[in-house]
Image: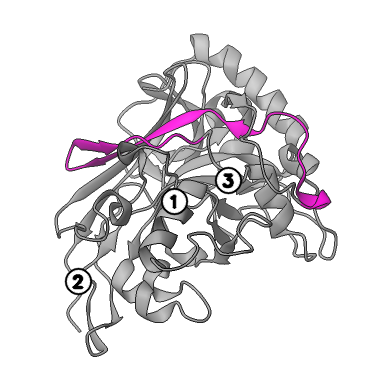
Amino acid sequence: MFDRTTLPYGVFSKAGGPKRIGVAVEDGVLDLAANLGSRFAEGSLNAFMAEGPASWAEVRSRVTELAQTADLVRDVELHLPFEVADYVDFYASEQHATNLGKMFRPDGEALLPNWKHLPVGYHGRAGTVVVSGTDIVRPSGLTLPGPSYRPSAKLDVEVELGFVVGVGSELGKPCRTGDFADHVFGVVILNDWSARDIQSYEYVPLGPFLGKSFATSISPWVVPLAALDRVPAPAQDPEPAAYLQVDGDWAIDLTLELSRNGEVVSRPPFAGMYWTGPQMLAHLTASGASLRTGDLFASGTVSGDEVDQRGSFIELTWNTSFLDDGDVVTISATTASGRYLGEVSGRVAAASRS
């Protein structure tokens, strides 16, 4: 249950009615259209997110007051909370990158030479971002031996945090790390489903493609930045380039929990991520690429130092065991103080017959 300080935003409907913007409050939803006017009678958060930090702070202050007294709506259907404009996935956990490097390059360096100089990332597909509760059809593709076209035998998950852009930027003008809170509205819990066998055959020389693009699940609630606890980020060595240097505490202090069929299998800590959200934003725009309202950029798999803190089955089982049809995977998040920040869940459905 969300408490009365988190107050995440989402889109809901009641008994087949129209979609509206709401805020989760403990065991119900605060209908913002009913309490704050027709500007919140929308099917997505995009217009509100585009208003910027001053509006976000004003509405949050008002919502905090209303959450104490207003009537709540219950028994609602939750929808994708915003229209995804673009989707980028990073590779920001040193532990995850090291684990996979050891697995894929047993006779070489675990981290490639560029990894500690920039946040490595790739573009995903905005059109395959789905809301929690959506079934995930097992993808098919070319895999070895062969290669032959077949359903993936190594379907995996990636425990991640996603950052949601509210305010866009100008093409040709990079954003600074200090601009992060001016552009990023909040975060979602994210599962970047991965077909490891498809990925391993296709990724040389250009990187992930079909092994990643078939589905990415996000939580139905967007937690605003104002609700997140922050701590100092881990030290970075070597010192990053000037455009990647960050002032202030921007490591988000939360723990993610990965469950398979109701059984907890790992608890990855997010505060230990090597690259922070502001650095990801700065690198994303460093070439002059612009932001748009609804852009989503994700952290990449979150993994910690311990075996039970790994955020993917390829790490947890060292490439020996993956998801079966019918498996239900749930990723949830809580703050260091125990506040619930939401969850994302999905069930694996059998591959489509061609």
Q: Secondary structure at mark 2?
A: loop
Q: Nearer the viewer, residue 326 or 19?
A: 326
Residue type, mark 1 in image: His
Residue at the image point whose x is 63% and y is 26% from the top: 226
Q: Position of residue 51 (x, y in %)?
A: 73, 41
Image quadrant where one finds the N terminus: top left
Residue type, mark 3 in image: Phe
Q: Is residue 48 something one can see in this rendering?
A: no
Location of mark 3 (residue): 163
Location of mark 2 (residue): 351
Residue at the image point whose x is 16% and y is 66% from the top: 350
Give yes or no for contact between labels 2 and 3 (Cβ–Cβ under 8 Å). Answer: no
Residue at the image point whose x is 39% and y is 37% from the top: 268
Q: Secondary structure at mark 1?
A: helix
Residue type, mark 2 in image: Ala
Q: Position of residue 9 (x, y in %)?
A: 52, 34
Nearer the observer, disc 3 or disc 1?
Answer: 1
The magenta segment is 241-270
Nearer the observer, disc 2 or disc 1?
Answer: 1
Q: Nearer the viewer, residue 213 or 221?
A: 213
